[in-house]
Amino acid sequence: MTHEEAVSKAAKLLRLATSDNPNEAALAAAKAQEIIDRFKLNADALNGEPKADEPDEPIRNFENPLDGNPYGKASTWRLRLASALARANQCRVWTRGGAAMLVGRPSDAEAVRYLFAYLANEVDGLAKRDAAGNGKAWANNFRLGAVEAIQAKLVEQKKSTQESVKAEASARGGGSAIVLVERAIQKIDAKDAATETWVKENLQLRPRGATRTSYDSGAREAGRKAGREIRLGSARGGLTSGARALGGGK
């Protein structure tokens, strides 16, 4: 299985999974992310020694905004969702004129776009349903709470996937196989660090100012709960925005 096939499989899971009962959206996102993470680990660890001379994809600064709007200012919750997904896939997000811009390797960026297209629509759909009549500040806190739930689940998923792959490797090949998994994890961590370094060396970024959204603990908790209970059915708005061409990088 190629990386493209792994991303397509993850997208299909989000697009086609159906349920008559509320399910945890964060789990759906984590499952899709797990498919991608497992591919990266298995490609190096379970198929033999990594090829030292295998060229890595170049890190790029993609010109088309992650949310597809080159002129609109991305809301705080969208930026936080984008950042969480980017970091889970060895990418980074920065803002240009308020728009969310993506930095990373093409295959990793593709995964971020698919996941963001699904989750941004789901979070927004839930807010429109549950926050109606509660005011703008409440709705913003609700969305932020949902993103916090998704972010936490992604972090848990990463640890769980690594431990599962280690256990599978141990059953297949013992200590030597676990060493290969550890090397694969180190390689992924190194790619993440390289992206961080690229951003620091190539982009002159200024710290973002603090947001002005008033904190509402009730709304935030309602959002967290809703973020764990989004339906796994077809995404609101679909995944077509994630399938658009990634555009030029500089």
Image (cartoon, rainbow, N blue to C red):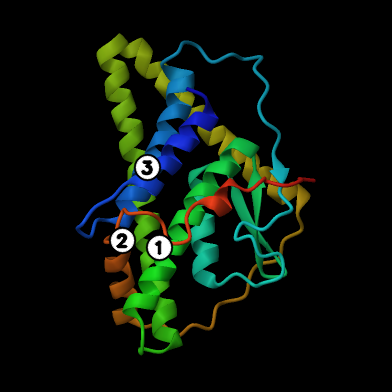
Dot 1 surroundings within 10 Å: few (below 14), some, or many (20 or more)? Answer: many
Element type where label 3 sits in the image: helix
The spot of residue 247 in percent (x, y) is: 72, 47
Q: Residue at x 39, y 47 (%)?
A: 14
CA gap, disc 3 and disc 2: 14 Å
The spot of residue 218 in percent (x, y) is: 29, 81
| Mark found first going from the N terminus, 3 or 2 | 3
Quadrant in the picture for residue 98: bottom right
Is residue 142 visible in the rendered image? The answer is: no
The spot of residue 102 in percent (x, y) is: 64, 52
Q: Nearer the viewer, residue 186 or 35?
A: 35
| Mark found first going from the N terminus, 2 or 1 | 1
Element type where label 2 sits in the image: loop
Q: Please, is residue 148 above or below residue 13 in the view?
A: below
Q: Type of residue at label 1?
A: Glu
Q: Nearer the viewer, residue 156 or 62?
A: 62
Q: Residue at x 32, y 54 (%)?
A: 233
Q: Please, is residue 10 above or below residue 220 in the view?
A: above
Identify the residue position indicated by label 1 in the image: 122
Q: Residue at x 48, y 28 (%)?
A: 40
Q: Type of residue at label 3?
A: Leu
Identify the residue position indicated by label 2 in the image: 230
Element type where label 1 sits in the image: helix
Farthest residue in the left direction? Answer: 21
CA gap, disc 2 and disc 1: 7 Å
Checking the image for residue 13, the label placed there is: 3
| Mark found first going from the N terminus, 3 or 1 | 3
3 and 1 marks in contact (CB < 8 Å): no
In the displayed structure, does residue 54 sit left or right of residue 20? right
2 and 1 marks in contact (CB < 8 Å): yes
Q: Residue at x 75, y 54 (%)?
A: 203
Q: Nearer the viewer, residue 98 or 11?
A: 11
